[in-house]
Image (cartoon, grey):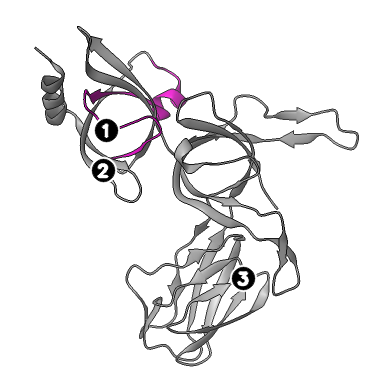
Amino acid sequence: MAIGPDIKEVLSEIGGAVTILRSPTNVTGEYIRIVLNKQVTKPFIREFFTEAILSYDTGIVAGDEILFADGHVYLVMNKTAAILEGETYQWNSVLHKTNAVGRILRKPSTSTRSTRYQQTAAWSVTNTSCYALMTESLYGNEMDTDEDLANLGLMREDLYISSKHGILRNDRFDISAVGALTKTSTAGTIATGAVIALGNAPITETWTITFDDATHFHVTGSDVGVLDAAGVVGTVLAVEEYFTVPAVFFTGTWAAGNTCVFDTTAEYYWVQDVKKRRYNEVWVATLAEDNR
């Protein structure tokens, strides 16, 4: 008698419900059992390394990103069949807890000029919502003493990321963020759920949106100064490659002199190399800080 269905029923009772994050539709209805390794003593392993039991007919595959009820997202590193009398009765798996979610940017062979006549790379977004485990590289973080002029610090990161995102060498892994917004107007409001979106080349800056009248506004950066970015309520405004204000962002009643202030924090990494053979469906990218 097959025991796979019995184990699956037990997992639904004592396991945890998870959601498989897939495009275009997430998959629900899966339950897994976490296996605790009491012999593990290294803090990194205890924090990010997890073993799990999956049902015999699970839809989870290596490379999947799975969301737990506590909000953490884990990357499925592999799946190994547990077989009895020639039948798979469960799957054993290793999961890595992710600590970064970013997007992958790719640069074409040509560059463009910005509105301030700067030569810039026209980065394009190839993938978003990429969950990954980013950690200091075990090797390569050392001082290069062979340089003639100075010792150069070579700080590298390893990025464990699903192969489905298709990250490539010389891509940019971007985990930049938009900070909380404050405003001086009480009658002027922000649409529920509306957010300012990062552009393809964000910078670390404090931005002030100032209304010239009830419907027109301009943008000033704390370092870059006043930008040639005239905004109109109800119309999308792309502020160079820095950020975009959606058309539905401003609601309520705004007046001349009202302001909105928010920060953008740039944090992106140059993909120096991608190892595709270490795991079947999880690639390991070597990252370096990117200030291009």
| Mark 3 burial class by Cα count in 10 Å: few <14, some 14-19, many 20+ | some
Instruction: Kindly indicate whether the residue at mark 1 contacts the one at mark 3 (C-beta within 8 angstroms).
Output: no
* Residue at image coords 48%, 43%: 165
The residue nearer to you, when weighing 250 against 275, is 275
Residue 264 sits above or below residue 162 on the image: below
Instruction: Kindly indicate whether the residue at mark 2 contacts the one at mark 3 (C-beta within 8 angstroms).
Output: no
* Residue at image coords 67%, 35%: 155
| Mark 2 burial class by Cα count in 10 Å: few <14, some 14-19, many 20+ | some
Q: Residue furthest right?
A: 148
* Cα distance in 3D space between marks 3 and 2: 37 Å
Mark 1 or mark 2: whose residue is earlier in sequence: 2
Amino acid of disc 2: Val
The image quadrant of residue 18 is top left
Mark 1 secondary-structure assignment: loop
Q: Residue furthest front?
A: 86
* Residue 87 part of the magenta segment: no
Q: Tag on residue 250?
A: none
Q: On the image, numbered disc 3 is attached to which residue?
A: 240
Mark 2 secondary-structure assignment: strand
Mark 3 or mark 1: whose residue is earlier in sequence: 1
| Mark 1 burial class by Cα count in 10 Å: few <14, some 14-19, many 20+ | few
Q: Residue furthest top?
A: 85
Q: On the image, numbered disc 2 is attached to which residue?
A: 27
Q: On the image, numbered disc 1 is attached to which residue?
A: 59
* Residue at image coords 35%, 48%: 23
Point out the stretch of residues depicted in magenta. 40-69
In-image side of 246 versus 141 (left or right): left
